[in-house]
Image (cartoon, rainbow, N blue to C red):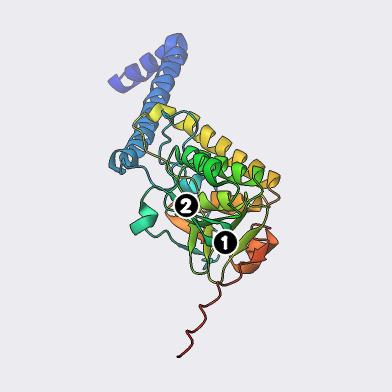
Amino acid sequence: MNQSSIMQQRFQSWLVDSGEQAILRWIFRGTLIVTVAVLALDLADLQGPIASADTAASPAEIREESPALNLPNVLPSILAPLLPGGDKRLVMLPEPDGALARPMTFELVGGGKLMAIGTITPGISAIFAAEVGRHGDYIKTVVLESPGGSVADALAIGRLIREKNFATEVEARKYCASSCPLVLAGGVERRAGEKATIGVHQVAAVPTAAVNRVRDDMSVAQTISARCQHYLSEMGVSPQVWVHAMETPHNRLFVFKPDELKALNLVTTTAVPAAAPAPKARS
């Protein structure tokens, strides 16, 4: 008997005696190796954008009552796709500058208008409430110009506006974006001037390196989006407003057309342009 036949017989004998267990062990080891490799790749993908992300809070930052809540910046296209067809209402989100980049300030002007200009920073709702406490009898309309900010504070401001029966307004060619439309929705009457920019996008967040919190943090983000939709329904505004927000990446802006603003009941009437000052009489 040649060497090849002897080796073949030994291999067949090994298969009969213990081959099944050995094969199962090798299959298990191979599966384990593949699983570890896939997890390692997933972890690298998650850590890459998190490590390179800017740690500064964006104007669209999610803030709940707990100041320790930081959501990872991993929410974009996995929650909802971009609108098909390259919708022209989807524009790049401009960086706020000047007064818009600073925390929101409040100034009572003529005609019962409270000008609310700037970023909705965490805790600004308490300052707004204090302003209303001082001047509530004189306030008729809250005029907004803001790139958005803290969602929780925007909801709180909007609810107080509704409680006090104030109107809200975005003046002609002014800007109300991100969480700012949530404040706009609080008005018993909601006005928008000609060519006012009113838009929404996904909530953004301060990134975190805690990769194992991704699943829980995404759940929190979805809960906040649900809260926004419930709030809009309570205010008499179509929840479809926030569906557009969830469809739009946080570095883009979905800008509503004037007819959409009215169809969704986010705007109830067109703002009347301020009257031009009368010419001085010549002597």
Q: Quadrant of the C terminus?
A: bottom left
Q: Mark 1 against mark 2, which lies toward the viewer? A: 1
* Residue position marked by numbered label 2 in the rendering: 249
Tag 1, which secondary structure?
helix
Task: From the viewer's side, name the closer residue of 35 and 204.
Answer: 204
Q: Measured from the top left, where is residue 68 in percent x and y?
A: 41, 28
| Local crowd size for mark 1, using a 10 Å CA cut-off: few (<14), some (14–19), many (≥20) | few
| Nearer-N-terminus badge (1/2) | 1
Disc 1 residue type (three-letter): Gly
Q: Is residue 46 depicted above or below 212 in this figure?
A: below
Disc 2 residue type (three-letter): Pro
Q: Quadrant of the N terminus?
A: top left
Q: Is residue 30 depicted above or below 251 in this figure?
A: above
Q: Confirm whether residue 260 shows in the render.
A: yes
Q: Is residue 238 depicted above or below 86 in this figure?
A: above
Q: Which mark is residue 222?
A: none
**Residue under the point 46% across and 90% down:** 282
Task: From the viewer's side, name the closer residue of 123 and 209.
Answer: 123
> Is 178 on the left or on the right of 238, as rendered?
left
Tag 2, which secondary structure?
loop
> Is 253 on the left or on the right of 268, as rendered?
left
* Residue position marked by numbered label 1 in the rendering: 111
- Asked where in the image residue 12 lies, by quadrant, the reply is top left
> Is 119 on the left or on the right of 234, as rendered?
left
Q: Outermost residue toward the top? A: 17
**Residue under the point 57% across and 68% down:** 193
Q: Confirm whether residue 12 shows in the render.
A: no
Q: Measured from the top left, where is residue 52 in percent x and y?
A: 28, 42
- Asked where in the image residue 9 lies, by quadrant, the reply is top left
- Contact (Cβ within 8 Å) of mark 1 with mark 2: no
Task: From the viewer's side, name the closer residue of 225 and 165.
Answer: 165
Cα distance in 3D space between marks 1 and 2 = 38 Å
